[in-house]
Image (tube, rainbow, N blue to C red):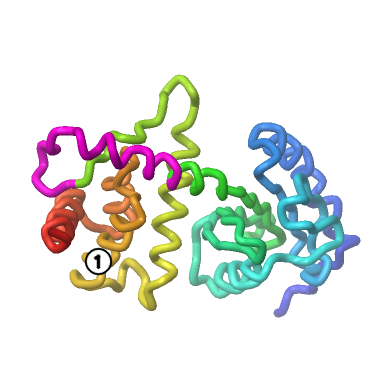
């Protein structure tokens, strides 16, 4: 028997408990992170609450982003069982946004809503590009790394006392996900040649100037770190 569609009136109380969560994370994450609570029973006016709405220009009563409906269809089809998905995109004004969607389900496991966190990481990407340009001269004066043909990862080591690990990880995710978006197959479907080309693309975009980037790339591709290093060595030899 098909379950009745819940109206916004019958669902409003269900979401009350999540308002304080939005307030908390908006305070913790700061003004560069938009927090949105969606009621999926009313997709044309799904936004129940929004914090830092200046990022997207949306307000309460607004609709979901262009990506959200595809998330909902994926979960409802049973094709995605995790509670959270993420993606990275460049929006119309050129800013780069990293988004996470957390799925809210009722006691019976039915999808009822989403909390979306949209983090503007544009400044991180600009900072990476700026620092990479400045470090080129320093890199030229450094001795060769121990691993032959491997890009130096230690130039942009995060300062543990500054709490910057999260930002560096965000930056790596942005560069990796943007690269993946340029391929017609997912990382799981890539063959050796495609993976090598992908690693070469990331190398051209200076990803491997960031500490921990080899491990993060290996995890995303589902291969070993040694394989990433091997691809990097071949890429560096090709550029000689």
Most extreme residue toward the top is 161
Q: Secondary structure at mark 1?
A: helix
Relative image position of residue 32 (x, y in whole percent) = 66, 43
Is 81 in front, or is 216?
216
Image quarter where the N terminus lies is bottom right
Is 161 situated left or right of 21 in this image?
A: left
Relative image position of residue 157 (x, y in whole percent) = 35, 32
Image quarter where the C terminus lies is bottom left
Is 170 situated left or right of 226 in this image?
A: right
Residue, x 17% and y 51% (percent of image)?
229
Residue, x 56% and y 53% (percent of image)?
98
First to last magenta residue range: 129-150
Q: Which residue is mark 1?
A: 195
Residue, x 74% and y 53% (percent of image)?
37
Is 39 situated left or right of 90 in this image?
A: right
Relative image position of residue 66 (x, y in whole percent) = 66, 70
Is 154 in front, or is 216?
154
Does the magenta segment cover residue 56? no
Relative image position of residue 51 (x, y in whole percent) = 77, 45
Q: Splitting the image into 4 quarters, where does residue 107 fall?
A: bottom right
């Amino acid at each position: 028997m098909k379950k009745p569609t819940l109206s916004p009136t019958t669902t409003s109380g269900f979401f009350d408990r999540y308002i304080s969560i939005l307030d908390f994370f908006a305070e913790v994450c700061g003004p560069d992170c938009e927090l949105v609570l969606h009621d999926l029973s009313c997709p044309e006016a799904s936004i129940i609450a929004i914090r830092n709405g200046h990022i997207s220009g949306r307000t309460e009563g607004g609709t979901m982003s262009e990506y959200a409906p595809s998330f909902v269809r994926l979960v409802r089809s049973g094709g995605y069982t995790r509670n959270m998905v993420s993606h990275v995109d460049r929006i119309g004004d050129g800013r780069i946004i990293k988004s996470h969607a957390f799925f809210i389900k009722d006691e019976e496991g039915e999808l009822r809503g989403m909390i979306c966190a949209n983090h503007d990481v544009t400044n991180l990407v600009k900072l990476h590009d700026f620092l990479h340009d400045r470090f080129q001269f320093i890199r030229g004066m450094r001795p060769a790394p121990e691993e032959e043909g491997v890009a130096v990862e230690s130039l942009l080591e995060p300062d543990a006392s500054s709490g910057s690990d999260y930002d560096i990880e965000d930056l790596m995710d942005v560069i990796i996900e943007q690269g993946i978006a340029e391929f017609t197959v997912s990382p799981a479907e890539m063959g050796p040649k495609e993976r090598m080309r992908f690693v070469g693309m990331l190398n051209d975009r200076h990803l491997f100037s960031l500490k921990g980037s080899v491990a993060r790339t290996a995890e995303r591709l589902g291969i070993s770190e040694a394989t990433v290093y091997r691809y990097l060595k071949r890429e560096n030899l090709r550029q000689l």
